[in-house]
Image (cartoon, grey):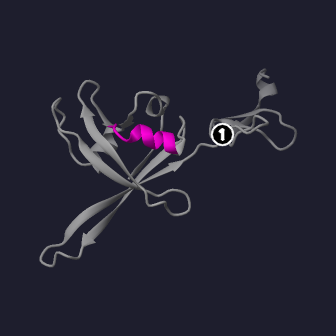
Amino acid sequence: MFEKAVTPSDVGRLNRMVVPKLHAEKHFPRIEEAADAAPVLLAFEDVGVGGGTGKVWRFRYSYWSSSQSYVLTRGWSRFVREKGLAAGDTVAFSQAAITDDAETTTDVKRRRMFIECRKRKRKDDDGCSDGNDGDHCPDDGGERVVRLFGANIAAAAIGAS
């Protein structure tokens, strides 16, 4: 369905993740945009590393009219804590349609939703990173290189150290 790089406020003390409006309206159940609209409980199966843990995560999904935002709230902070999420990590939401064979007269389709975390590579002990934040440490001695518009620029060439 979609991926979102979590922001500092998504993993901070606000205990909520803002779902981009485009994706909320396209992929999640429709909810009323009124202040008194009832929240919806969404369940996601954890894909996890190596094919899945099978754990089901439940989040309250609601619309906050004050900020005109779709949010995942209750259950989100536990997910963040147990997964060790930090700003810049990616959370991916996906789904699969399943057919209920018990119904013989009609084809009842339900959605099975999944959630997966991908950690942003953190800086290792010698200060190098994987390039996700725009920096790159070459193998030839550690000179700092900045990638700008698809070109590697040595820090010394731009007067930075």
Q: Nearer the viewer, residue 56 or 157?
A: 56
x and y, in percent, of residue 44 in the image: 37, 53
Q: Nearer the viewer, residue 18 or 47?
A: 47
Instruction: Let me know if residue 100 is in the magenta part.
Output: no
Q: What residue occupies the far bottom of the structure in this picture?
A: 104
Q: Give the residue at x 44% y 33%.
A: 10
Q: Give the residue at x 24% y 44%.
A: 40
Q: Give the residue at x 32% y 36%.
A: 71
Q: What residue occupies the far top of the structure in this picture?
A: 159
Q: Main secondary structure of the magenta part?
A: helix
Q: Give the residue at x 68% y 43%.
A: 130
Query: In the image, 128: left or right of 112?
Result: right
Q: Is residue 5 visible?
A: no
Q: What residue occupies the far right of the structure in this picture?
A: 141
Quarter occupied by residue 137:
top right
x and y, in percent, of residue 121 in the image: 64, 43
Q: Is residue 32 visible?
A: yes
**Looking at the figure, which quarter contains the C terminus?**
top right
x and y, in percent, of residue 33 in the image: 19, 34
Instruction: Let me know if residue 81 is in the magenta part.
Output: yes
Magenta stretch in the rendered image: 72-82
Amino acid type at mark 1:
Arg
> How many C-alpha atoms fall within 10 Å of the one at disc 1: few (<14), some, or many (≥20)?
some
Quarter occupied by residue 25:
top left
How many marks the image carries: the answer is 1
Which element type, helix, strand or loop, lies under badge 1?
Answer: loop
x and y, in percent, of residue 110 in the image: 25, 63
Instruction: Give the residue number, with chain letter if any, for mark 1.
Output: 122
